[in-house]
Image (tube, rainbow, N blue to C red):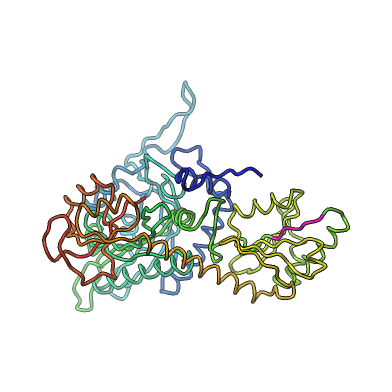
Amino acid sequence: MAKNIKTRAEDYSQWYLDVIKAAQLADYAPVRGCMVIRPEGFAIWEAMQRDLDRRFKETGHVNAYFPLLIPMSFMTKEAQHVEGFAMECAVVTHHKLEHGASGLRAAGELEEPYIIRPTSETVIGHMYAQWVQSYRDLPVLINQWANVMRWELRTRLFLRTSEFLWQEGHTAHETEQEAQAETLRMLDVYADFAEQFLALPVVKGPKTDAEKFPGAVTTYAIEALMQDGKALQAGTSHNLGQNFSKAFDIKFLGRDQKQEHVWTTSWGVSTRLIGALIMAHSDDDGLVLPPRVAPNLVAIVPIFKSDEDKAKVAAFIDRIVASLCGEDELAAAKSRLSSGDITRYFFDKVTGQSILVDWRDNRPGDKQFHWEQRGVPFRFEVGPKDVDAGSVVVKRRFDRAKEVVEASKLTPKHLRKELEDVQRLMFEKALAFRDANTQRAASYDELKQQLEKGGFVRAFFQPDREAEAKIKEETKATVRCLPFDAQGKTGKCIYSGKEGAPEVLFAVAY
């Protein structure tokens, strides 16, 4: 099978798109700036949803759903918010179509236009104002899984599209302290999810005023480093203070019998995390997935020439599948509709993660290549000689390690241990890469030199909108965050020369 992926060194942007295409994760849609997420890509998103949803519920949150369309008047109630999103909004102005001389045309102009949600603070604020009457109604801890639209001019699959999928948490609290605690708690949830589930090391910290969410008091972010040396914001958590509660009049009767405005937060991650996975872990041969995210854990490739060999190999594979997935699943899979000549067996019915057997009439090498490009963590080769030896050739996608394993040792416990080893090794590799590509700068000239090499650059800098804009103009870099692990450290600002500046994290970002 011919190689269909550019190398990272040749063309990183094209490599990224080639990996997505080869793994059949997504396609560009006929709608401007939008994408179609294919089943392989959506299965990855479902895995993320499942793990995050569990984490949200463990911290007391519940799911709800709010309208896609938001009255334009709502967007104008919070000045900073509308200023931040106005240029990205898609607007609905009519409510029906009619036949005209040249075909269908818009008809029924709306009295008030609707905005297709770029985010839901406004409509949720409106509803919270109706639901919250007393301190006994607080806190409100709601999450929404939804799609949003931001009219992007330059798009790239998963990283930046006009429509994308995400979750947005919106909470209301009795006190400022509770809202701040919630903001940081959810930031920690995101960081733990990124590192433990996605094997993606992140740096946590607040954004500068120039980079914070429109309408927020403080925005906190987790920042990850991609293999091309660019940063990617992997999640945000916003302390909104009372900005939205005052705009939407979300009041409650306090314990002292006085009317007060609630304190609110919002937080979210999106399908751009799939882009982060690709750019942080994949290689020149295609997709590499951390096992906890992978929809398919093992692809078994039978090798045979004759019908007799095929029957022999099939019986042996059935024993392996029965050992890993159970006799009941072996029987159940035979009664299910299969995708062509690929049989799916559920290894874990809770996560839906599977073991596949590839019976297609293709060359073994082509089938190996097929599953390698799709990032399946392990591939098993089984031929007549392996059956005779009672063993299986096991190939690991992450680092291409290869070993012969006795079939009797292929138990669920053994496979889970191997998968966890790969999960750990992938995180360690990504962490080592980030650490090796994190530098320090003691002056502005040094900052510019380091940024040309790519990666994170730590430096003392006093956040200032004008200075940040100038630095971005000259270097394309922004302050990604003020790292928590550098709190308390101060020094001479690389831009102004003044003492007492905090340590910040600079990078060119997606």
Assign the N terminus to one quadrant of the image.
top right
Of residues 92 and 277, the one nearer the viewer is: 277
Residue situated furthest left in the rendering: 498
- Locate residue 332 relative to residue 420 in the image: left or right: right
Q: How many marks?
A: 0
- Work out whether residue 271 can be spotted: no
* Quarter holding residue 314: bottom right
- Locate residue 430 relative to residue 289 in the image: left or right: left
The magenta-colored residue range is: 300-304
The image shows residue 279 at horizontal and vertical percentages of 46, 54
* Quarter holding residue 473: top left
The image shows residue 475 at horizontal and vertical percentages of 26, 47
**73 shown above or below 438:** above
Of residues 165 and 303, the one nearer the viewer is: 303
**357 shown above or below 134:** above
Residue situated furthest bottom in the rendering: 255
Of residues 442 and 6, the one nearer the viewer is: 442
- Work out whether residue 385 can be spotted: yes
The image shows residue 27 at horizontal and vertical percentages of 53, 43
The image shows residue 231 at horizontal and vertical percentages of 36, 55
**93 shown above or below 208:** above
Residue situated furthest right in the rendering: 308
What is the chief secondary structure element of the magenta stretch? strand
The residue sitting at 46% across, 47% down in the picture is 9
The residue sitting at 55% across, 50% down in the picture is 25
Queried whether the magenta region covers residue 410, the answer comes back as no
Queried whether the magenta region covers residue 302, the answer comes back as yes
